[in-house]
Image (spheres, rainbow, N blue to C red):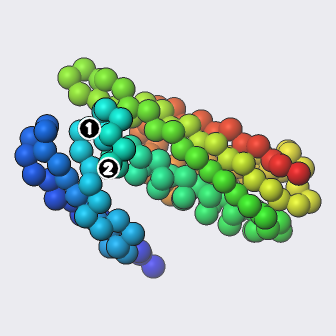
Amino acid sequence: MAIEKSASVHWEGGKAGTGRISTETGALKDYPYGFKSRFEDDRKGTNPEEIVGAAHAACFAMAFSLGAEKAGVVPESVDVSAKVRLVPDGGGFKIDRIALTLDARIPGVDDAQFQELAQGAKQNCPLSKALAAVPEITLQATLHG
């Protein structure tokens, strides 16, 4: 069973231009993005790296929770963040690192099993697989008792 999701953007202008991003679900509807929110610290819009980070964190959290449940434990809470680093590359830019951070509460799990579940989620998360061209994807996983 294949699943397809979609997003669209509309851009006007060059570097000083602005864009609007929308998702199929309407979670983002004509949400602004542009060079200022990407390269300058304009908080009035989003940017591709932030969206990739949100998608990767969300996918990882789901993969981790599913893996834990399959192992016979159910997380009380799972918090994941992703930092996506954009660096100069010749005349352009590239993403060279994604740093995932996992904080979770899971009753009845020791740290060794927790780390194994976390690494399994990192390897099996569909977005981790899709982002395999990123040279460095790190994971810091912390189990809270």
Q: Residue at point 23% right, 28% down? A: 92
Is there a contact, CB below 8 Å, between mark 2 and mark 1? yes
Q: Nearer the viewer, residue 55 or 16?
A: 16
Q: CA distance from mark 2 to mark 1?
A: 8 Å
Q: Is residue 81 above or below residue 67?
A: above
Mark 1: which amino acid?
Lys
x and y, in percent, of residue 98 in the image: 50, 38
Residue tagged 2: 45
Is residue 105 visible to the viewer in this orientation of the structure?
yes
Residue found at the very far left of the displayed protein:
13
x and y, in percent, of residue 61 in the image: 62, 58
Q: Which element type, helix, strand or loop, lies under badge 1?
A: helix
Image quarter where the N terminus lies is bottom left
For label 2, count other residues whose C-alpha is less than 10 Å away and answer few (under 14), some (14-19) or many (20+).
some
Q: Residue at point 37% right, 75% down? A: 25
Is residue 129 visible to the viewer in this orientation of the structure?
no
Residue tagged 1: 36
x and y, in percent, of residue 102 in the image: 68, 47
Residue 66, by quadrant, is: bottom right
Image position of 43 (left or right of 90): right
x and y, in percent, of residue 142 in the image: 76, 43
Mark 2: which amino acid?
Gly
Residue found at the very far top of the displayed protein:
90
Q: Residue at point 42% right, 39% down? A: 133
Q: Residue at point 61% right, 63% down? A: 62
Residue 3, by quadrant, is: bottom left
Of the numbered discs 2 and 1, the one sitting upstream in the chain is 1
Q: Is residue 81 above or below residue 68?
A: above
